[in-house]
Image: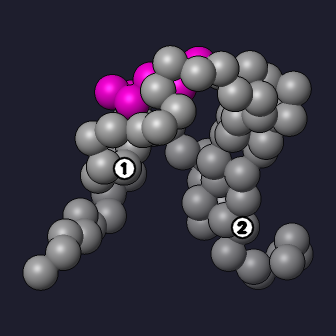
Amino acid sequence: RIAVGSAADLVVYDPHARVVVDQELLAHRNPISAYHGRQIRGAVTTTVLGGRVLDLDAPIGGELLTRP
């Protein structure tokens, strides 16, 4: 819900963006992607966490979660 007092965890999505997937730049643990080198439509352009716009090049903290 978008309202005063809510967490304000949102993303801004551009459905017209065209992006070529580069598995080296993906932010997940799997080192490969079936989409590597393919052009896809749509991309998240901005992430808002707790009402703050995130800069993915300058993380604001958190805890790295690992599997046991």
- On whether residue 38 falls in the magenta region, the answer is no
Residue at x 71% of width, y 35% of height: 43
25 lies above or below 62:
above
Residue at x 36% of width, y 49% of height: 28
Quadrant of residue 2 within the rendered picture = bottom right
SS at mark 1 in the image: loop
Residue 39: x and y, percent?
65, 20
For label 1, the residue is 28
**Residue that lies at the very extreme toward the front in this rendered image:** 34
Residue at x 47% of width, y 37% of height: 34
Q: Quadrant of the C terminus?
A: bottom left
Q: Which residues are magenta?
A: 20-25
12 lies above or below 1:
above
Q: Nearer the viewer, mark 1 or mark 2?
A: 1
Quadrant of residue 20 within the rendered picture = top right
Residue 52: x and y, percent?
60, 53
* Mark 2 surroundings within 10 Å by alpha-carbon count, few (fewer than 14), some (14 through 19), many (20 or more): some
